[in-house]
């Protein structure tokens, strides 16, 4: 199997997971009380869908996308080594085999920083998506 085909498989699986979580979040949110009240008030379905349903269901989707991105970063190391591509994954495996602790620690630090950055971006997006998540002054 070519490396591109393997990447497409991973991408398809990632899209499937995010799509399923998106669908579940939208279905749950569309059954909530404030959405039913907005429909009963006579608001157009388009406005109810985008302002009340989609916007409030983005938090679990954002979490899922962040986790998938972090998983893809970690999976890139495995794909590089499995398909004998030169990169940080092959460097990690070769360094472990040679017992080069400094390089292994540096690559582990890079992975931890990458995960931290992804989680930070997800947390910052929470405050943009849902104003209720923002911290109050003095906290």
Image (spheres, helix red, strand yellow):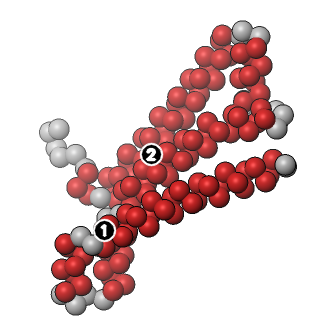
Which residue: 58% across, 59% down? 15
Which residue: 67% across, 51% down? 10
Q: Nearer the viewer, residue 111 or 25?
A: 25
Circle 2 is placed at which residue position?
A: 121
Circle 1 is placed at which residue position?
A: 29
* Res. 55 visible in picture: no
The relative height of residue 111 versus residue 102 in the rendered view (above or below) is: below
Please rate how many residues cluster around mark 2, counting C-alpha atoms within 10 Å: few if below 14, some from 14 to 19, many from 20: few
Are circles 2 and 1 on residues that touch, CB within 8 Å? no
Image depth: mark 2 or mark 1 in front:
1
Cα distance between the residues tagged 2 and 1: 24 Å
Q: Quadrant of residue 90?
A: top right
Please rate how many residues cluster around mark 1, counting C-alpha atoms within 10 Å: few if below 14, some from 14 to 19, many from 20: many
Q: Quadrant of residue 28?
A: bottom left
Q: Is residue 104 left or right of residue 81?
A: left
Residue 73 at x, y percent in the picture:
61, 40
SS type, badge 2: helix
Residue lying farthest to the left in this orientation: 138
């Amino acid at each position: 199997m070519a490396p591109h085909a393997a990447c497409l498989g991973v991408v398809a699986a990632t899209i499937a997971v995010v799509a399923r979580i998106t669908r579940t979040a939208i279905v749950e949110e569309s059954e909530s009380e404030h959405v039913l009240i907005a429909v009963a008030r006579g608001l157009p379905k388009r406005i109810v869908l985008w302002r009340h349903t989609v916007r409030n269901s983005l938090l679990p989707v954002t979490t899922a996308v962040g986790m998938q991105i972090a998983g893809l970063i970690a999976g890139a190391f495995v794909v590089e080594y499995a398909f004998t591509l030169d990169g940080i994954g092959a460097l990690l495996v070769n360094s472990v085999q040679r017992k080069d602790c400094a390089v292994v620690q540096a690559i582990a630090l890079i992975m931890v920083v990458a995960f931290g950055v992804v989680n930070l971006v997800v947390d910052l997006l929470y405050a943009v998506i849902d104003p209720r998540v923002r911290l109050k002054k003095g906290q």
